[in-house]
Image (cartoon, rainbow, N blue to C red):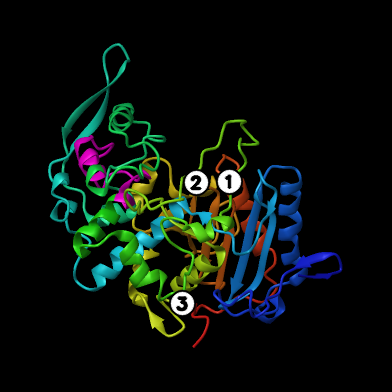
Amino acid sequence: MRRFLGIVLVFASAAAWADALPSARPEDVGLSSERLGRIGKVFQREVDAKKLPGAVALVARKGRIVYFEALGARDPRSGAPMSRDAIFRMYSMTKPFASVAAMMLAEEGKIVLTDPVSKYLPGFAKMQVSVPRVDSTGRLTYETAPAKREMTVYDLLRHTSGLVYAEFTPNGAVKEAYEKAGLLGTATSLTAAEQVERLSKAPLAHDPAEVWEYGLSVDVLGRVVEAVTGTRLADFLEVRLFKPLKMADTAFFVPREKKGRLAEAFPNDPSTGTAIKMLDVGAPPGNDMGGSGSVATASDYVRFAQMMLDGGQLEGTRYLSRTTVALMTSDHLGKIKDNGMTPGELLLGVRGYTFGLGFSVRLEDGFAATPGRAGEFMWGGAGGTFFWVDPKEQLVAVLLTQAPGPTRVYYRKLFKQLVYQAIADELAPAMSASRP
């Protein structure tokens, strides 16, 4: 690590980037070294104030890494320092992996997006919907009615299936049904078949295609991938994505020899005082949760994100067609997003974002209280992880923490501000390919 004028900057040695991307001086790709140094200063203050246990921040532009820093503690209990190769629980940053897996199968003609989910998982053929009613006394009750139509694979990808998270849904009857079925949180102890059976017997929170509500849709999408391929989701992803993309530490559990690199949270959330319980990733799970079960490093995730920025290919290997990437990163909600909480409000606490097929997508340069460009796509995880890809600025950024409290939304916005203020060149060209 070098220090210039008191600003902490990180430039790559060959060993540091062996499994990530090529490195460059920030000025070589239109960024300011001095301004990038603000990231470390600001986040170090948060670590020193014991608001964050530690963090890894990575920024790449035009296919080259220009900033990669580890701050604070990897394990606040032991005091072990954070390292750039620390492994983090991705939680919902798993969803883009499962979404890419489904789109790979679509490209092969094994899935059609408008297929009913019941084609692959018959239990979802005749779902009931929980419908809220207000009686003459003003009391809220719930009735069930047959779904107007079946959910499709498309609905799973864009979170319009009616499947939700019990912890967040306002539908009391669905919440109660999920709780009784043991579907709270990341139910990794259930087998894939058990999860599907229990979900198919619980009512939907909405008729499919009518409301965007974030939830267990991508867990079910992972089950669809398994039904089509006849293999576990983790195995499919390992063969088709993780291994060829050289994501050496991305998996659905941490093997014994790597446990010393696993990042941990504070015992209690600094902002609320509540006890923190992180997902147990020390052994293979009962099922591979496509919506929340993976672990990865910043080096791994930046390769995945760069592949998406480069139109579905990286270093000569193609994973998706550029037309598929364009489809995945377009608006797939339209007016649906106006029916309740929008993707941007959930992820960043701001409006101005819609949802594509696996990613939140920015609609315009403006109309969102956070820096960014129209067409950028992103997502985050409940454990404190966040990434985004900005095709217009040819930018990829990854922030990994294990801080699952409500302040994670604040840190996402803070990191975005600090990255964009470091751009020092003229307007980037429209084309997003970073290398020939």
What secondary structure is found at the residue carrying circle 3? loop
Image quadrant in which you'd find residue 49: top right
Instruction: Residue 67: give x, y in percent of width and height.
Output: 67, 69
Q: Is residue 207 above or below residue 366?
A: above
> Label 2 crowding class (10 Å Cα cut-off): few <14, some 14-19, many 20+?
many
Q: Is residue 62 above or below residue 413?
A: below
Residue corresponding to mark 1: 408
- Let me know if residue 410 appears in the view: yes
Kind of residue indicated by mark 3:
Asp
Image: magenta residue range:
195-219
- In this view, which residue lies farthest toward the bottom? 436
What secondary structure is found at the residue carrying circle 2? loop
Q: Residue at x 12, y 41 (%)?
A: 126
- In this view, which residue lies farthest toward the right? 5
First-in-chain label (3 vs 2): 3
Residue corresponding to mark 3: 310
Q: Is residue 43 above or below residue 274?
A: below
> Label 1 crowding class (10 Å Cα cut-off): few <14, some 14-19, many 20+?
many
Relative to residue 367, is residue 100 drawn left or right? left
Disc 1 to disc 3, C-alpha distance: 28 Å
Which residue is more in the foreground, 293 or 363?
293
Q: Is residue 203 magenta?
A: yes
Whether label 1 touches label 2, CB < 8 Å: yes
Disc 1 to disc 2, C-alpha distance: 8 Å
Relative to residue 323, is residue 88 drawn left or right? right
Residue corresponding to mark 2: 382
- Let me know if residue 325 appears in the view: no
> Label 3 crowding class (10 Å Cα cut-off): few <14, some 14-19, many 20+?
many
